[in-house]
Structures are given as structure tokens and as C-alpha cells.
Image (cartoon, helix red, strand yellow):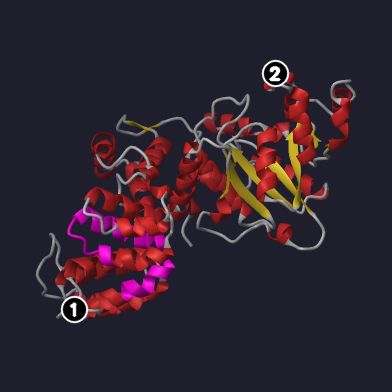
Amino acid sequence: MPDFVYDLPRLLAIYRTEQALARHNAPALRSLETAGFGPSRYQPLHSNSSRKTLGVLAGSFNPLTRGHMALVEAARRAGADAVLLLLPLRAIDKEAVTRASAVDRALMLTEWAAHQTNVGVAFVNRGLYVEQAVLLTAAFPDSRIMFIVGHDKIAQIFDPRYYEDRDVALRALFAQASFRVAPRAGQDDGALRALLTREENAPFAASVASLAVDANVDALSSTVVRERARVGAPWEALVPSEAAHFIREAQPYAPPTRLPTGEEIDRYGLRQTILHGAATGRLGLYPGNFEQLNRTAIADTEDGRATRRWIAEDLPRRGVDRIDDTVDQPIEALIRTLSDVDRGARLRAAQALGFRYATEAVEPLMRALGDEDHYVGEYAKDALVMIGAPAVSPLIQAIEDKGEHPTRRWRAAQALGSSGDARALEPLVAVLEDQGDDAAVRKIAAFYLGRLGDARALPVLERVRQDSAPAFSGRTVAEAAAHAIQLIERQRKT
């Protein structure tokens, strides 16, 4: 199981969803459970029995804390059949977000939600609750919407500064949603009653109730976690294990690190640059080497220094600045574009099909592996890796067919080896064992057998260490096999 912090397919799916929503001018809500990973977490809401209640906890989740967990549990006790963690891309009266990007915050949320029952995650491009309520009612028409908020938020909701006509907006809001209010910053049930008994607020009081929470939410706030992480104070007990692992690994709230050589590196900044490069086509990364590149980039080694120079100097000149609107085109149109005379259009279409996990595009992408343009072929290969399991059988068939063009075969071998799929082992071993096969394909097979880390490949790799096939692209098949053995042995020791 790959470390979720470096789960590139999931990160790219979240990145693409966030980018598309940020470009979308009209109000919109996008569930991340439909972005290509994980089953739906909303099963009770699709029941045909009685009407269900969806608890909605909106926030920046920067990071997710045990305070948020306590609010989720309180929402369940208050009658929520499922809970949606809602991440607004446009917040109201919120401080500038410190470090952890929306993509990484959503990554933490989806990882935690995957281990819960009936918890989902979604992006929304509106910050006002009245706008969110409209979107939620449309997305879950058979559910009652129950917002979970702190006292500071309910006071904001009743504040006329946020509306052209407060009462009209509030009538629309409370017609669609109710609110459960948790105490915050010393504002208890008495403060809530005082707010609701004001003459201007009394007509809406029936839709607002207090929420009993088994935790001091203020002491477990995201602000406290960020500050403690920044100064090196203990913070792990304040967050769930998924968030703790992400913060330790990615260090989004830590100051720059000074290496023994005196060089100062921003570990999280490097991660962001690498992810953006992968998402925008500047980097043709496979899922496996996203983690490897991140680790190399922070190393106090010559490779690390060279990688950091490359990220700073060369990476900005590659690819495009951002995902363009190609990713929003219909899948059928993108498949047709793979045959376009414009190589740039073909390249963007291949990239977009990977981002979309377009299983119906596997065969066209297989053909594109042999594109006359090197980069189109590479992007087609990367797209097949992103699509994952549905592409494995066609990739195996391409490798086994020695009548295929060598370029398509070795790209297919790279994609298969990068997939991490257990089915990759036998066909890669078979290619490597056949001394009459193409040297380039055999060398790639040896390399990716090392990456797969399966000890069952060791006997054939040991035999191939004596192989006399000529060098291809700077390394012989025997050298590739020796390197693969080292990789497998290293993994067996860890």
C-alpha cells in the first residue's frame, strides 16, 4: 500500500477537481469521492426509507484536528446519518491560509474519511452558508441539511454586514438548512440563547440549537497545531493519526531547514513545486517516483543539490503554467484529439485523459504509445499508468507481442512496471529471460522488476547478471539486473 502522502494519482485527481472548481464562475460543489478513488461514503443518504439528515462541517481544516473529529461525533449524536466535510475554496472572514494547500488538506480529509463510516469530503467554490445550502440541497435532494458550526460562525450568519437584504437571505437559508452550534471562545449556551432572543433573530431561532461536544474545541484548534508545529512544540496529540503522519512527512508548517552545508531548504515548498510540475505537464512522473523525487530533493547529497538546482532553474521552463480547459472536454472529444495533426493538442489530450482516469481511452492511448512525437508517447504512457488496473491487460498484451513496434513495447513495459500491479511480475520476468528479445525492452523489464520489489524475480535477475547483451542508453541489461537486485535486497531489509 503506497504512502498516501505521495499517492500521485489521488493528488492529481484532487488537484484537477480543485483547479476546475476554482475556474468555475457559477456556484458549484464537487465531491472528492467521485474523483477516481474510493467508494461513496453516503450510502445511508440514498436509502428509500425515511428522509435522512446530512451533517455538514465546513472549514479550512488546516489541519484536520481532534476538535473536528469531536464535532463529527457530536453531529452523529445530534441525528446526522452521514457527515460531509466541506472545504470552501472561497472563505468568508478567514485569515490567509497558512501553508498546507487546499489539495493537501483535502488529501488529509479523504484519507481520514476513508477509515470512517458515512463520512465524505467535498470542495465548494462559495463561502456563504446560504449559497452552500442551495448547492447541498441540489446534491442531496432527499436529505435534511444540518450545518455544524461554532458560536463565532452563527454570529457571523446573523450579521447584516454580509447581506444586501439579511432577512430575505436568512429565510432562504433556514428554509433549506438547520444549524447546530458548538461553544467557542467562551461563548456557551447562554450566549447562544441571548443571540437568538434578539428581536431581529427570533424568527429564525427554531432552526438553531446548541450542540454538546465532548472536547474543548478551542484547545484543539488548527491554529494551535500550526503554531506548535512551527516552534517545535508537541502537537501530535491534537490531530488524528492521518494528519499527524502527513504533517511529519510533508512538514507544511515547519520553517525552512538549514542543512550542515549552510543551504536552507523549504521542504514543503519543494513538494508543492514538484506536484505542480506533475499536474501541469512539466514533469512526466510515475506514481512511484513522485515520492523518490521528493526525497531526493530534500537530501543533503550531491544528487539532492542537483535536483534542487533543476527544480529552481530548469523546471519553470518546461510544460505549461497550469492545467488548461482541455481537462474539462468530453472524453470522446479528447480521444478524437489523440489523432489531431497538432502535436500540442495530442499531448494535452493524452495528459487530460490520464487526469480523468478515462478507462474508455485505454485502447486509443495504447496506440498513442507509438506516436511519432516522443513527448506525446510519453504522456500517453503516463496516462495509462494513471488509469491503472484497466490498462494492465492491454499493456501485457503489447509486451508479449514481439511484432509490436519496439518503441510501443518499451513504453508499455515502463507503464506496466510503474503500475505496481501484481500482474506485472510474470510478463516482465518472461521478457527479461528471453535473450533474443529487444535489449531496450529487457533492460526496462529488469529495472522495473527492481522497482516492484518482489523477491520472486531474484533468480532470473541473478542469471541475467551474466548477460552479454549490448548496452542501451548507457547501461547493459546485466547492469540493470544488478541494480534491480540491489533494490529488492534493500527493500527486504527494511
Q: Residue at x 33, y 37 (%)?
A: 321
Q: CA distance from mark 1 to mark 2?
A: 71 Å
The span picked out in magenta is 367-396
- Helix, strand or loop at label 1? It is loop
Looking at the rendered structure, the kind of residue marked 1 is: Gly
Give, as a three-letter code, the residue at label 2: Arg
Quarter of image, res 381: bottom left
- Residue 425 appears in view: yes
**Residue 437 image point, x, y percent:** 17, 78
Is residue 460 in view?
no
Q: Residue 462, percent across and down?
A: 24, 76
Residue 11: image x %, image y %?
Answer: 46, 49
Q: How many marks?
A: 2
State if disc 2 and disc 1 touch (CB < 8 Å): no
**On residue 403, which mark appears?**
1
Please state which of residues 387 and 344 is positioned toward the viewer in this rendering.
344
Tell me the residue that label 2 is attached to.
161
Majority secondary structure in the magenta region? helix
Residue 325 in percent (x, y) is at 39, 43
Please tell me whether residue 313 belongs to the stretch shown in magenta. Answer: no
> Which numbered disc, 1 or 2, marks the residue closer to the eye?
2
Q: Nearer the viewer, residue 359 or 312?
A: 359
